[in-house]
Image (cartoon, rainbow, N blue to C red):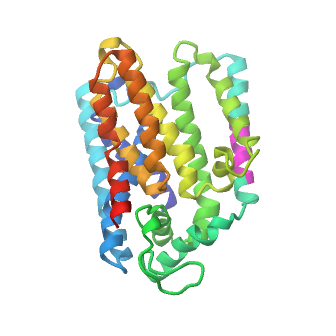
Amino acid sequence: MIILLLCLAPFGTGLLINSIMEKENRSMGTTYISGFLVLLAAFQLMAVPVVFLDAFGFPWIVKAFNILTILLTGGGILSSLHLWRRESCIFQESVLPKKKSKVEIIQWLLVFILLGFQLMMAVTRASFDGDDAYYVVQSVITDETDTLYRILPYTGFSTSLDMRHAMAVFPIWIAYLARMTGIHATIVSHSILPLVLIPFTYLIYYEIGKVLFREKEEQLPTYMIYICLLQIFGNVSIYTNATFLLMRTWQGKSMLANVVIPAIFMVVLWLFEGEPKKRGKRNSLWFLLFFINVVAAMMSTASVFLNTMLIGIMGLVLCVQEKNIKILFKMAGCCIPCVVYALLYVIL
């Protein structure tokens, strides 16, 4: 069930995104990334109204998201079959690896060794952070009582809806995984999610590297080794993204720093690479950037200003570089989820 929910369903949903994505951006990696992000965004959009309207609505969330996942995955499979008949090519690159030099092979082996080391340490030396007393316990309470932010994790007593956390439903998603698999929510958080989210983060960095080293592909494994070392030795403070990635993988703040923000850079790099006449005009990527901001709202209230500020600065720079004022408006449109999140937070 874990493989189905965290591997096959995201890839199937990504095939649906592939059908509207430009050929040069299609690959096995981008398919999985886009599918995973769209599924998280769908969960956010579907779960938040239930959290506000129904104190005991978790079973409804489970049923509704199961139906939604089946529809998105099935739609992806059907769209990929249609795309294959039309173009005879689902992905831009060959599934078979290109011939590499001995040095590159050794470097890629080192990348996988470093990644395997991080996964082993993340699971066998699990770090229990103080925030787990809220976030992980919230997932446990949701799975065991079907309530949605109506029980205070610190005391176990009933409380009013916690507005600070109610719109960031990442713990509810973890509870959904626990309910579907029968695995305790704490084990899902500490032992299952690191095995998925850490490689997922590196997959995003890999896609970023493919753009940065488009003309020097032999340097890509060196770049990945450098990223691995930055993460392994990044615990210079409890506040670094590396600390959150390896020691607090299951928290929304970690997802914001290690998945959402790199994903924004990845999509913007896709948007503004290649021929000048195509820059900023790939509508499917604007669509994906919008949903990344929905995912950001799912993770943490910090996304309201961090993402908006980041995308705003990018929009200004690219607007001047490309001499196109429309880019600024498109960037602003992609920030709508964060703006709505902020308004709801202030009003409620």
x, y percentage for residue 234?
Answer: 73, 42
> Residue 168's image quarter?
bottom left
Q: Is residue 217 visible?
A: yes
Task: Tell me the quarter of the image containing the C terminus.
Answer: bottom left
The segment highlighted magenta reads 112-121
* Magenta stretch contains residue 119: yes
Magenta highlight on residue 186: no
- Across and down, in percent, residue 107 comes to 71, 26
Residue in the picture at 60% in, 79% down: 154
What residue sits 32% from the left and 53% below the top?
340
Give the residue drawn at x 39%, y 22%: 318
Res 32 visible? no
Please give the name of the residue rendered at 34% of the width and 34% of the height, measured from the top-left corner: 331
Q: Which of 280 and 318 is in front in this view?
A: 318
Q: Which of 87 and 243 is in front in this view?
A: 243
Residue 301 percent across, percent down from the top left: 47, 56
Left or right for 59, reference 129: left
The picture quadrant where one finds residue 274 is top left
Q: Is residue 40 left or right of residue 120?
A: left
Nearer-the-camera pick, 338 or 192: 338
